[in-house]
Amino acid sequence: MTKTKIQKAKEILEQEGYKITKETDESKLLDIPELNISVEIEVHDKGKSWDELNLSAREDDLLTAEQVLFLMNSKYAKQLKMDGSSSNDDFFIKQYSELSRKNGYVAGFYADSGFSRLGSVGGSDDAGSGRGVRFARKLKRTKK
C-alpha cells in the first residue's frame, strides 16, 4: 500500500472517531523485574499536551510516582535518562494528587543538570517542548 493510501485510510478512520496508535516495539522496552513492569526506553510525542495525547484514557499505562521514584534512584536511571543527563526527556506520569486532579492539573517527571523531581506540570492542555510520554506495562513472563 502506498503512503498516500495509508494516510487516506487513517484520515477516514479518524473522521469516524477511531484513534490510530502504533504497536510498541518490544526492543524499545526495558524490563524492570523489581517492579514487574516493562518501560519504554525513549520519551516520545514531545511537545504535545495531556489532552492532545488523550492520556486520560491511558492513565493506567503511565508510570506511578512510586515507580518513578524507584527508577530515578536505580541502576536503570542512566539508560532511561532519569539521572539528570538530559533536560529534554521529561514525561507525564499518573496523577498522584487528588487535589491536583480535582483542580485540572496533571503530573510529570522533570530532570535537568543536577536535579530530578516529580510535580504538577500545569493544566491538561499545557504542552512543554521537552515533555512527552513514556508508557509502562506489566512485565510479560515466559514459562520455563
Image (cartoon, rainbow, N blue to C red):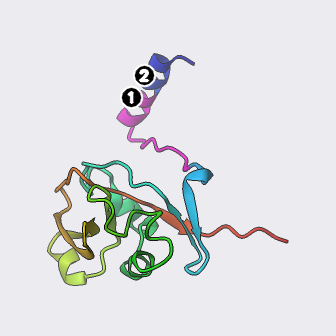
Disc 1 secondary structure class = helix
The kind of residue on which mark 2 rests is Lys
Residue 52 lies, with reference to residue 64, above or below; the image says above
- Pick the residue in front: 65 or 74: 74
> Badge 1 is on which residue?
11
> Badge 2 is on which residue?
8
Res. 53 mark: none
**C-alpha distance separating marks 1 and 2:** 5 Å
| Neighbour tally class for label 2: few under 14, some 14-19, many 20 plus, Cα within 10 Å | few
Q: What residue is rendered at 24% in x and 48% in y?
A: 47
- Please tell me whether residue 23 belongs to the stretch shown in magenta: yes
Q: Main secondary structure of the magenta part?
A: loop
| Residue 18 placement: quadrant | top left
Disc 2 secondary structure class = helix
> Where does the image place residue 32, in percent across and percent down from the top left?
57, 72
Q: Are marks 1 and 2 in contact (CB under 8 Å)?
A: yes
The kind of residue on which mark 1 rests is Glu
- Please tell me whether residue 40 belongs to the stretch shown in magenta: no
| Neighbour tally class for label 1: few under 14, some 14-19, many 20 plus, Cα within 10 Å | some
- Pick the residue in front: 54 or 112: 112
Residue 139 lies, with reference to residue 19, above or below; the image says below
Q: Which residues are magenta?
A: 10-24
| Residue 87 placement: quadrant | bottom left
Q: Is residue 24 left or right of residue 117?
A: right
Q: What residue is rendered at 34% in x and 59% in y?
A: 55
Residue 24 lies, with reference to residue 106, above or below; the image says above
> Where does the image place residue 117, in percent across and percent down from the top left?
26, 76
Q: What residue is rendered at 38% in x and 50% in y?
A: 44
Quadrant placement of the N terminus: top right
Q: What residue is rendered at 42% in x and 71% in y?
A: 63
> Where does the image place residue 40, in percent across and percent down from the top left?
49, 59
